[in-house]
Image (cartoon, helix red, strand yellow):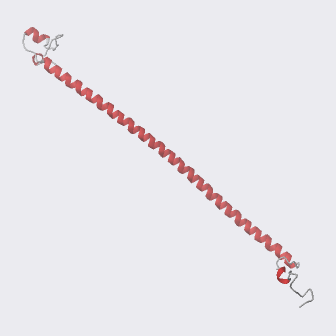
Amino acid sequence: MPCSNCRSRGVRCLLLPDSDICGTCHRLGIPCDASEDAICTLNRLVAESDRLDQAEVAEEAKFRERAAALQQKAEAYQKAQSELNESLAKLERLREQKRMVFRKGKVAVAESSEDVSTSTLESQSMGAWGTSNVDALFDWNPATPNFLSGES
């Protein structure tokens, strides 16, 4: 930053090595305010730059932390979605199996009742005793008198 003397004259202001005055003010023998302005401004700029660097590092760490948390949530969401899809597919398979078992059972019962009915009717028409209770007609206990032995 140029000193006020160099600024008013429109010349370039350069500090002398190991000195706090510029070359123009030194040649002219006048007091120079370059060192105070330049150093203070430079110190402020360096301090502000350091502060911004620290803020950037902190914000970047926070960003990475949030991105990692979001990634974990996304993976958990994908895993949960996959588990839901598997569960739904299994539920659909079980329901389809249940419907198939019910259909097969219904068909088997219908076929078996048709087969039994026709065979029973054929047997009964030929005089079969398949549906009669023989125990009701005969007493199989030897101690009990019955009409076959001639006793009353």
Count the numbered circles shown. 0
78 over 149 or under it: above or below: above
Whether 44 is drawn above or below 23: the answer is: below
Q: Based on the displayed image, in which of its 4 quarters is residue 107 positioned?
A: bottom right
In the rendered image, the quadrant that contains the N terminus is top left
In this view, which residue lies farthest toward the bottom?
152
Q: Is residue 40 left or right of residue 84?
A: left
- Look at the picture and state if 127 lies above or below 32: below
Q: Quadrant of residue 9?
A: top left
What quarter of the picture does the C terminus occupy? Answer: bottom right
Query: Going by the picture, which residue comes out furthest to the left?
Result: 30
Seen in the image, is 124 located left or right of residue 5? right
Q: Nearer the viewer, residue 99 or 53?
A: 53
Q: Position of residue 42 (x, y in %)?
A: 20, 22
Q: Is residue 11 left or right of residue 78?
A: left
In the figure, is residue 58 to the left or right of 25? right
Q: Toward the viewer: 4 or 94?
A: 94
Residue with the most extreme right position: 150
Outermost front residue: 143
Residue 21 placed where, x, y %? 13, 13
Q: Position of residue 22 (x, y in %)?
A: 14, 13
Q: Residue at x 83, y 72 (%)?
A: 119
* Residue at 67% over, 64% down: 102
Could you tell me which residue is drawn at 76 percent across and 68 percent down? Answer: 111
Please tell me which residue is depicted at 84% across the width and 76% down the height of the picture: 130
| Quarter of the figure with residue 65 | top left
Which residue is at the front of the view, 142 or 102?
A: 142
**Residue 127 locus on image (x, y percent):** 88, 79
